Each structure stands twice: as structure tokens, then as C-alpha cells.
Image (tube, rainbow, N blue to C red):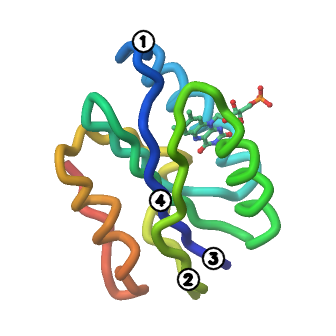
Amino acid sequence: MIRILYFSTARANLTRADVDAIASHASEANLKRGITGSLAYNGRNFCQCLEGEEGQIRALIETIRKDDRHSGFKVLDEKTVQSRYFKDWGLRLVDDLDFSYVINAMSADSRDREPVS
Ligand SMILES: Cc1cc2nc3c(=O)[nH]c(=O)nc-3n(C[C@H](O)[C@H](O)[C@H](O)COP(=O)(O)O)c2cc1C
């Protein structure tokens, strides 16, 4: 299983409702593919952490990379993991100004539990 983190910039005219729609569609689709993760949005940029079986994650990352609702897509980090951090979330949408929530998830191990707010 791998966990991956990327950063991108939302298309200028993207609304909060658009972001909500992306997240709710993605959440269901991810669970069907055994993918879990979180999408952080600060009103301008996205930072997303995804985890799952390597082939599924690489295929999804290529789909997301080509999505014209954002640009400047850049993978920041990726690693092999033994267990999930976002156990119950197909895709948790978080409002996060500095992206610390998803960035910290990259270094989580199996002893850590995802904080519930
Ligand atoms: C910032 C961002 C994050 C996204 N995250 C996901 C995701 O985690 N899972 C997903 O299935 N689609 C995600 N999408 C949407 C995909 O790019 C694509 O539109 C979608 O997978 C197509 O789904 P469909 O084949 O059901 O139409 C994201 C899009 C954006 C702009």
C-alpha cells in the first residue's frame, strides 16, 4: 500500500460548492476502489493525501492530474505504508490554511489515530 501527497492550485472560478461536489463524488468513488484520504482546501490551493493499493493510487493520481479544475499539480511526497491513517474516510474534506493536517498524515504510522473533530 502507498500513501501520496500532492499540492495544486484551484481554477480561479472554482466555487466552494464545486469543491464540495468534488469531495462528495470522490469520497464514494474512493471507497469503491479501497482508497482513503483527505482533501485540504484553503480557498485557493488544494493539498490531498491518498492511500491505497499502489496501482489504484497511481491510476487515480493520473486522472486527478489531468482534471482542469486545478493546475500546478505537484507530488510532494510518497511512501509505502503498512496501514491506513484515514481508516473511515473515502475522502475527508478539510478547511486548512497551512495544510498541516494532510502534511502530518504523511508521517503517521499504525499507532497514530486520525483525529476526529
Ligand atoms: C482537487 C481534486 C481532487 C480530486 N480527488 C479525487 C479523488 O480523491 N477521487 C476521485 O475519484 N476523484 C477525484 N477527483 C476527480 C477526478 O479528477 C475525476 O474528475 C473523477 O475521478 C472522475 O470520476 P468519474 O469517472 O466518476 O466521472 C478530484 C478532482 C480534483 C480537482
Q: Residue 107: x percent and y percent? A: 36, 81
- C-alpha span from label 3 to label 2: 6 Å
Q: Residue 75: x percent and y percent? A: 53, 63
Q: Give the quarter the ligand 1 occupies.
A: top right
Q: Which residue, given by chain and number where applicable, does mark 4 sit on?
A: 49
In-image side of 11 versus 3 (left or right):
left
Mark found first going from the N terminus, 2 or 1: 1
Report which quarter residue 80 is drawn in.
Answer: bottom right
Mark found first going from the N terminus, 2 or 4: 4
Q: Residue 9: x percent and y percent? A: 42, 37
Q: Nearer the viewer, residue 37 or 110?
A: 37
Q: Amino acid at mark 3?
A: Ile
Report which quarter residue 42 is drawn in.
Answer: top left
Q: Badge 2, how many Cα within 10 Å: few under 14, some, many 20+?
A: few
In-image side of 61 versus 87 (left or right):
right
Label 3 CB sits under 8 Å from any ligand 1 atom: no
Q: Which residue, given by chain and number where applicable, does mark 1 sit on?
A: 13
In-image side of 111 versus 64 (left or right):
left
- C-alpha span from label 2 to label 4: 11 Å
Mark found first going from the N terminus, 4 or 3: 3
Q: Badge 4, how many Cα within 10 Å: few under 14, some, many 20+?
A: many
Report which quarter residue 54 is drawn in.
Answer: bottom right
Residue depicted at 82% across the width and 67% down the height: 55
Under tag 2, what secondary structure?
Answer: strand
* Circle number at residue 2: 3
Q: Amino acid at mark 1?
A: Asn
Which quadrant is home to the N terminus?
bottom right
Q: Which residue, given by chain and number where applicable, does mark 2 sit on?
A: 79
Q: Nearer the viewer, residue 107 or 14?
A: 14
- C-alpha span from label 3 to label 1: 32 Å
Mark found first going from the N terminus, 1 or 4: 1
